[in-house]
Image (spheres, rainbow, N blue to C red):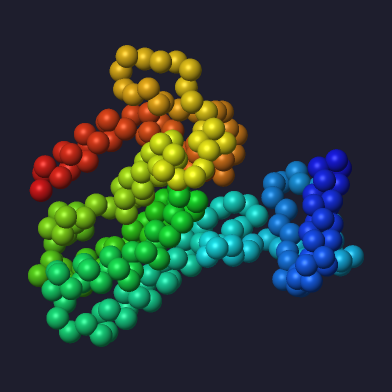
C-alpha cells in the first residue's frame, strides 16, 4: 500500500503541475498496466477519474503486453516488414542482388530491428517467424532462389537475423559500459568481483532469476555472451573466413 500511495502521489503532483502550466492531460488517453501474477491491481486516478486498466499498450512503437511476452510485437513487426517486402516484389522489375539487398536493408530490415534490444524474441516460433522475412527477401533474387537459405546468406554476405541481434546486443552493452550512451551501467548491470587472467576485466555478474520474462530480458540474456565475447568474435571470424 505504501508503494501504491507514492505512485498516486506522483500522479497528483502531475495533475497540479498541469493546472499550474495550463497543460491538461487527456485522462481518457492515460492508461494503467498491472504487471505480475501477484499484482494487487490497485486503482489509480487523475483529476478524480479512474485510469483505464489495459493488458497491452504501444509505447514508442513497441507493443508491450502485461505478461512481458513479446510474441504480439514480433507478429506486428513481421507484418510491417512483409508489407514493405511485398511492395518491393510488386514494383521492382530488375531484382538484382544490388537492388534487392539495398532495398531490403533500408526498407524492410529496420521494421524487425527497431528497439530489438527490448523485444528480442526467445521463443522458437517467434525467432522462426522473424527469420522468415529475410528468407523471403533473399529468395526474391532470381539467380539465388534455387540455393538453400544458408547458401544465399553466404553469397550475399549476410548473417542470420538471430546472429545480428546478438551482435547488436553486444554493441549496446559496449556503448553503455564505455559511456557512449548516456545511461549509467550500474543501474543496469552488476560487475563481477572475480577477476580472472583469461578474458577481459569488464565481466558482468549474472543474477538468479525465476521467470522467463526476466531471464531473457536484455540485462540478463547478454551477460554470458558478453563475458565470452572473444568466443563470439572467433565464431564470426570463422563465419566470414568460410566465405
Is 164 left or right of 43, judged from the image as shown?
left
Q: Is residue 166 visible?
A: no
Residue 148 lies, with reference to residue 217, above or below; the image says below
Q: Is residue 36 visible?
A: yes
Identified at 71% across, 46% down, the residue is 37
Nearest the viewer among 158 and 152 is 158
User: How far from the left and from the top, in percent, is residue 10?
Assistant: 80, 52
Residue 233 lies, with reference to residue 150, above or below; the image says above
Quarter occupied by residue 106: bottom left
Is 204 left or right of 10, judged from the image as shown?
left
Identified at 46% across, 56% down, the residue is 115
User: How far from the left and from the top, in percent, is residue 183?
Assistant: 51, 43
Residue 94 lies, with reference to residue 15, above or below; the image says below
Identified at 84% across, 61% down, the residue is 16
Identified at 36% across, 43% down, the residue is 171
Which quadrant is the N terminus positioned in?
top right
Nearest the viewer among 152 and 64 is 64
Quarter occupied by residue 231: top left
Nearest the viewer among 192 and 239 is 192
Is 35 left or right of 77, judged from the image as shown?
right
User: How far from the left and from the top, in percent, is residue 136?
Assistant: 27, 68
Amino acid at each position: 500500500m505504501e508503494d501504491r500511495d507514492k505512485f498516486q502521489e506522483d500522479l497528483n503532483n502531475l495533475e497540479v503541475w498541469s493546472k499550474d502550466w495550463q497543460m491538461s492531460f487527456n485522462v481518457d488517453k492515460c492508461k494503467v498496466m498491472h504487471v505480475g501474477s501477484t499484482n494487487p491491481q490497485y486503482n489509480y486516478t487523475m483529476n478524480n477519474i479512474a485510469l483505464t486498466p489495459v493488458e497491452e499498450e504501444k509505447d514508442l512503437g513497441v507493443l508491450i503486453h502485461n505478461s512481458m511476452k513479446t510474441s504480439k510485437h514480433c507478429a506486428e513487426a513481421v507484418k510491417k516488414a512483409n508489407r514493405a517486402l511485398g511492395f518491393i516484389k510488386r514494383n521492382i522489375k530488375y531484382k538484382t542482388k544490388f537492388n534487392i539487398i539495398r532495398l531490403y536493408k533500408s526498407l524492410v530490415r529496420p521494421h524487425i530491428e527497431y528497439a530489438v534490444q527490448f523485444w528480442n524474441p526467445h521463443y522458437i516460433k517467434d525467432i522462426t517467424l522473424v527469420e522468415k522475412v529475410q528468407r523471403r527477401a533473399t529468395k526474391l533474387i532470381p539467380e539465388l532462389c534455387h540455393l538453400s537459405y544458408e547458401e544465399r546468406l553466404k553469397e550475399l554476405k549476410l548473417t542470420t537475423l538471430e546472429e545480428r541481434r546478438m551482435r547488436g546486443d553486444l554493441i549496446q552493452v559496449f556503448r553503455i559500459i564505455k559511456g557512449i550512451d548516456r545511461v549509467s551501467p550500474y543501474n543496469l548491470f552488476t560487475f563481477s568481483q572475480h577477476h580472472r587472467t583469461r578474458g577481459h576485466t569488464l565481466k558482468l555478474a549474472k543474477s538468479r532469476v525465476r521467470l522467463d520474462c526476466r531471464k531473457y530480458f536484455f540485462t540478463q540474456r547478454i551477460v554470458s555472451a558478453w563475458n565470452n565475447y572473444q568466443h563470439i568474435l572467433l565464431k564470426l571470424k570463422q563465419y566470414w573466413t568460410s566465405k
